[in-house]
Image (cartoon, helix red, strand yellow):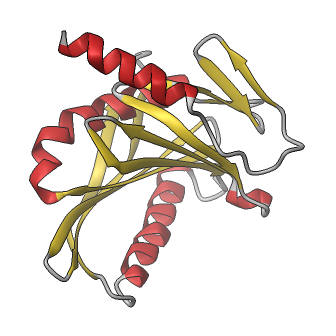
Amino acid sequence: MRAAILIVALIAWSVALPTLGNAQDAFETRGERFEFSGVSFPSVADTFAVMMVQRFPNPSAGTQLQYRSPIAPRMPFDIYIYEADLRAGTEEAVRQEFDTALEGVEAYSREDVEVTTESSDTITITAVDGVSYRGWRGQFRLDRGSASQTSLLYVFVKNGWFFKYRISVERALRTFLEPRVQAFLRQTLADVAIDGG
């Protein structure tokens, strides 16, 4: 029964669909997949449904996909997809991009949020299609007054494109949601595709 309710909720969410960055971009549905600005992606990945899609005005900034789950509806899971400069080699490029993203998280602390880096290390995810992706994972504690969150950052390269994932969750939910996060990474690394990539 719970599975049926979850499926109905995910379908309802996926129908409520995305805010688009530019009206000139083609947005097509193909079964349970969508295509926007050269990116093809699933409407639902694990328990997360796509809620917003945006292409940034600067082409090098790429495309953002935002998924949400009815399990934790205030918890967006963002994927940023943009072309990778691999001249230094894939592993070094991923590390450099992770460091740049890490600086962005730390800059956030200059506002009214205290950021504490809890861990950062390499990670290997084997996607549902059997392909393994080696990247970087960072975990941060975000404190704003009495509110505390865990923020996760992942960076991978797939076919010459960076896949940067960001999610922040209430600390009480992090252990419960960790398997969902891993399942989401495994599915989207397999199922999100870039034209020509």
Q: Where is residue 120 in the image (x, y as percent from the top left)?
A: 26, 62
From this viewpoint, is residue 126 visible? no
* Residue drawn at x 65%, y 42% as measured from the top left: 160
The image position of residue 131, as x and y in percent, is 44, 22
Q: Which residue is drawn at 74% across and 51% down?
A: 21
Q: Which of 30 and 184 is in front in this view?
A: 30
- Residue 195 occupies quadrant: top right
Viewed as shown, does residue 30 lie left or right of 41?
right
Task: Tell me: residue 85, above or below residue 45.
Answer: below
Q: Is residue 166 left or right of residue 33?
A: left
Quadrant location of the N terminus? top left
Whole-percent x and y of residue 146? 13, 78
Using the rendered image of the protein, determine whether residue 18 is visible from the camera's viewpoint. yes
> Percent position (x, y) of residue 154?
38, 51
Is the C terminus in the top left, top right, bottom left or bottom right quadrant? top right
**Left or right side of 100 for 64:** right
Total labels: the figure holds: 0
Q: Measuring 59% from the left and 34% from the top, which residue is drawn there?
A: 17
The structure residue drawn at horizontal position 44% and vertical position 62%, both measured from the top left corner, is 98
The answer to which quarter of the image holds residue 2 is top left
Relative to 137, is 44 above or below?
Answer: above
Q: In this view, does 184 lie above or below 178?
A: above
